[in-house]
């Protein structure tokens, strides 16, 4: 059974009326519309599974508002989802904008209470999938995607960052999770069998770390939680040489 909805008391899904009032409170967004919000128009254009997407237009231009819903949009409240994903997306966009600002829409505002990001309205852009269906050729698509991936993946990796910086940045994205304490924390992926446990002293608590075989480490199948690396690492990698995580499995099973 899925978890019940967990939302802040002041969270409300936006609609085509309330989103105009929301944007009117953001000076950086108002600069791209017009001073008189009574002439603004908004429409909800989201065609995906998760979020509400609004385009708000004024005489001077427009902005896009992306709001996370606390459930899977195509299913409803029976399938709850964490609003915190909007925070992680905003932080990821902020990091990526430092590296390839020319390949991202500009961010104007993030509202944690509403789980909403306000960003640049790219026009006359269309969804890439629709362009492919129409047979449109994009001569710069491959090079732009390759540049984005190369810059953002390499310059946020252990190959580029020093250890302290990498762990500090990882902690931001792992703050939801806690380290294993006598196996009382996030469950391990079902395909993993802990080989041994070793007590590890800490200034505030006594924790246990899990040893995995070299074969499992080399295949990146160690998916207890990213927070293990930061919380238990603290200057020395808890499981020896760095290894990869399957982040999809990590997030799923860490929240089971």
Image (cartoon, grey):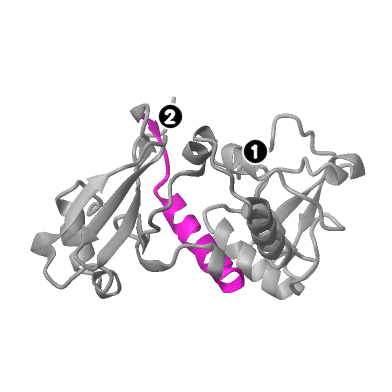
Residue 203 is at least partly visible in this image:
no
Q: Position of residue 59 (x, y in %)?
A: 19, 65
Q: Residue at x 70, y 43 (%)?
A: 246
Q: Residue at x 44, y 58 (%)?
A: 87
Q: Residue at x 76, y 74 (%)?
A: 162
Q: Position of residue 155 (x, y in %)?
A: 71, 68
Residue pointed to by mark 2: 2
The alpha-carbon separation of the residues under discs 2 and 1 comes to 17 Å
113 up-or-down from 75: above or below: below
Q: Position of residue 133 (x, y in %)?
A: 51, 33
Q: Residues within 10 Å of mark 2 (few under 14, many from 20)?
A: few
Q: Earlier in the sequence, mark 2 or mark 1?
A: 2
* Left or right of residue 83, residue 224 in this image: right
Which residue range is magenta in the image? 77-101
Q: Is residue 227 magenta?
A: no
Q: Secondary structure at mark 2?
A: loop
**Of residues 7 and 52, the one drawn nearer to the viewer in this rendering:** 52
Q: Position of residue 38 (x, y in %)?
A: 8, 62
* Left or right of residue 47, residue 17 in this image: left
Front: mark 2 or 1? 1
Q: Residues within 10 Å of mark 1 (few under 14, many from 20)?
A: some
Residue pointed to by mark 1: 249
Main SS class of the magenta portion in the image: helix
Screen quadrant of the C terminus: top right
**Of residues 212 and 108, the one drawn nearer to the viewer in this rendering:** 108
**Of residues 46 and 187, the one drawn nearer to the viewer in this rendering:** 46
Screen quadrant of the N terminus: top left
Label at residue 146 = none
127 up-or-down from 57: above or below: above
């Amino acid at each position: 059974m899925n978890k019940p909805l967990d939302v802040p008391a002041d969270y409300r899904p936006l609609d085509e009326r309330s989103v105009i009032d929301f944007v009117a409170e953001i000076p950086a967004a108002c600069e791209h519309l017009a001073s008189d919000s009574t002439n603004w128009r908004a429409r909800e254009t989201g065609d995906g599974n998760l979020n509400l997407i609004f385009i708000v237009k004024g005489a001077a231009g427009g902005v896009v508002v992306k709001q996370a819903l606390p459930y899977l949009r195509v299913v409803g409240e029976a399938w709850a989802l964490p609003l915190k994903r909007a925070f992680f997306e905003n932080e990821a966009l902020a990091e990526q904008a430092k590296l390839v600002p020319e390949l991202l829409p500009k961010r104007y505002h993030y509202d944690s209470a509403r789980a909403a990001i306000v960003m640049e309205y790219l026009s006359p852009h269309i969804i890439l999938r629709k362009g492919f269906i129409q047979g449109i050729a994009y001569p710069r698509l491959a090079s732009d995607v390759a540049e984005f991936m190369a810059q953002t993946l390499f310059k946020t990796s252990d190959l580029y960052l020093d250890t302290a910086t990498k762990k500090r940045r990882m902690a931001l994205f792992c703050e939801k999770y806690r380290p294993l304490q006598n196996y009382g924390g996030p469950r391990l992926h079902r395909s993993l069998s802990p080989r041994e446990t070793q007590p590890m002293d800490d200034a505030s608590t006594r924790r246990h770390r899990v040893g995995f075989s070299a074969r499992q480490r080399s295949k990146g199948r160690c998916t207890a939680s990213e927070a293990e690396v930061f919380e238990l690492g603290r200057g020395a990698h808890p499981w020896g040489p760095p290894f990869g995580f399957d982040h999809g499995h990590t997030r799923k099973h860490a929240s089971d």
